[in-house]
Amino acid sequence: MKKTYFISDLHLRETQPELTALFLDFMQNLAPTAEAVYILGDLFDFWIGDDEQSPLIIQVKNSIKQITAQGIACYFTHGNRDFLIGKRFAKETGMTLLPDYHIINLYGVPTLLCHGDTLCIDDVKYQQFRQKVHQKWRQWLFLHLPLKVRLKIAEKIRAKSRKDKAQKPDDIMDVNRPFTLAQMQRFNAPCLIHGHTHREAIHHEEGKKRIVLGDWRTDYASILMATEKGEMVFLK
């Protein structure tokens, strides 16, 4: 039976090897059984450039390369934590980078894919920050800083993000429902799959299906499986 897997928000980092173990297990045992694997952002907790190397990064690269070498397609949508993953990483792994919004034919169903942060328009401060860090000239300047400097900047941004998130109301960190439905209508997609909010669920709204991928924790991997029979279920 043909099937496709969707994952997001793993936030892999050196300090939580349990998450890495879950990802490697998925890539070694489940991914090879699929037609394609879609990673919808925040694979890493932070990404400071394709020139960074670490045991974690090497492990992740090798695991992706192993499945693409077998002819299994692997696609990646940038998240809010790893939007600087670039062409070098994609080339080294055989992974295909996708735009912020991408429509696919998922076993006959037009399905819109995105990370999900662009749908949270009620979080005005975040959207302003996102607009700044996605400016190409800012990214160019950051990527040309010494690696040690980028690491320090990344840690400061992570700390500020944790502080800001703790102070924000829960409702503004979720998607704006009318805007999200409008995006689905814009792409003429009856189905949407996204991550970012960490609120795993399958919603049925105004005749459309919206599937939210969950975040990965040390004891749980949020994996959505879609099959050619029309099934869309989270693996437990």
Image (cartoon, rainbow, N blue to C red):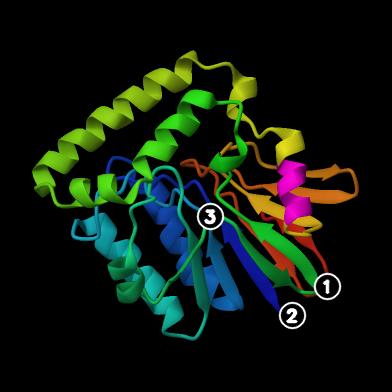
- Which numbered disc flags the more N-terminal residue, 2 or 3? 2
- Which numbered disc flags the more N-terminal residue, 3 or 1? 3
Towards the viewer: 187 or 18? 187
Looking at the picture, does residue 226 appear above or below residue 158? below
Mark 2 highlights which residue? Answer: 1
Q: Is residue 206 left or right of residue 89?
A: right
Q: What is the secondary structure assignment of the residue under circle 2?
A: loop
Q: Amino acid at mark 3?
A: Asp
Query: What residue range appears in magenta?
Result: 180-186
Q: Residue furthest right?
A: 207
Towards the viewer: 114 or 17? 114
Q: What is the secondary structure assignment of the residue under circle 1?
A: loop
Looking at the picture, does residue 93 appear above or below residue 114? below
- The location of residue 20, given as percent across then percent down, is 38, 53
Is 182 part of what is drawn in magenta?
A: yes
Main structural element of the magenta stretch: helix, strand or loop? helix
Residue at left offset 24%, top offset 28%: 156
Q: Amino acid at mark 2?
A: Met
Looking at the picture, does residue 64 appear above or below residue 162? below
| Nearest to viewer (mark 2 / mark 3) | 3
- The location of residue 134, given as percent across then percent down, is 38, 46
Mark 1 highlights which residue? Answer: 229
Q: Are marks 3 and 1 in contact (CB under 8 Å)?
A: no
Position of the N terminus by quadrant? bottom right
Looking at the picture, does residue 154 appear above or below residue 19? above
- The location of residue 184, given as percent across then percent down, is 75, 51
